[in-house]
Amino acid sequence: MIKRKIDEQLRRWHTTLNEALWAYWMACHGATKVSPYQLVYGHEVVLPWEWKTGSRRVTFQDQLTTDEYSALMKDGLEDLANHRLNALTNVEANKARVARWYDKKVKVKAKPRRSGVEIDSADRV
């Protein structure tokens, strides 16, 4: 995704890189089924348009007192361990799925046995 974004505007890669990295961090990934931002911080990102338009989530957070907001963030951190364990389970399931697919395609070749090969006295230990 990052390479595709930069390839679209090669001459402005230095300005596009920031946007590409931001998009990567906010996107939900197939292996974990969670965005990297959510794995790190424990909640979804508040997008810039939500601040500008005053979305319901932003309005709710603005109405909270400091203590209520702190308690809400602590509860979110407790849920963070659960999100991370779910992501790990998803990654392990994906690896197992790939291994099963790979094992179907691989054909094991048997090594031919050498018979009658004599060992020199110098090769013996």
Image: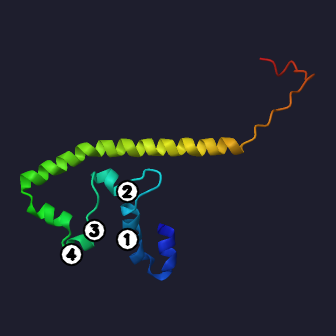
Instruction: Give the x, y percent position of residue 84.
Output: 35, 45
Q: Tell me which numbered mark, 3 or 2, is placed earlier along the sequence.
A: 2
- Give the mark nearer the N terminus: 4 vs 2: 2
Helix, strand or loop for disc 2: loop
Could you give the CA–CA distance between mark 4 and mark 2, rounded to whole angstroms? Answer: 23 Å
Left or right: residue 113 compared with residue 32 = right
Q: Name the quadrant of the C terminus.
A: top right
Amino acid at the residue labelled 4: Thr
Residue at screen point 41% across, 71% down? 17
**SS class, disc 4:** helix
Helix, strand or loop under label 1: helix
Q: CA distance from mark 1 to mark 2?
A: 17 Å
The label nearer to you, 1 versus 3, is: 3
Among the two numbered marks 4 and 1 on one chain, the one whose residue lies closer to the N terminus? 1
Which residue is tagged 4? 53
Residue drawn at the location 28% of the way across and 68% of the way down: 47
- Against 123, residue 16 (above or below) is below
Relative vertical location of residue 52 with respect to residue 95 in this rendering, above or below: below
Badge 1 crowding class, 10 Å Cα cut-off, few under 14, some 14 to 19, many 20 or more, is few
Who is closer to the viewer here, 81 or 3? 81
Mark 1 and mark 3: span between their CA atoms? 15 Å
- Residue at 44% from the left image edge and 56% from the top image edge: 29
Mark toward the viewer: 4 or 3: 4
Label 1: which residue? 18
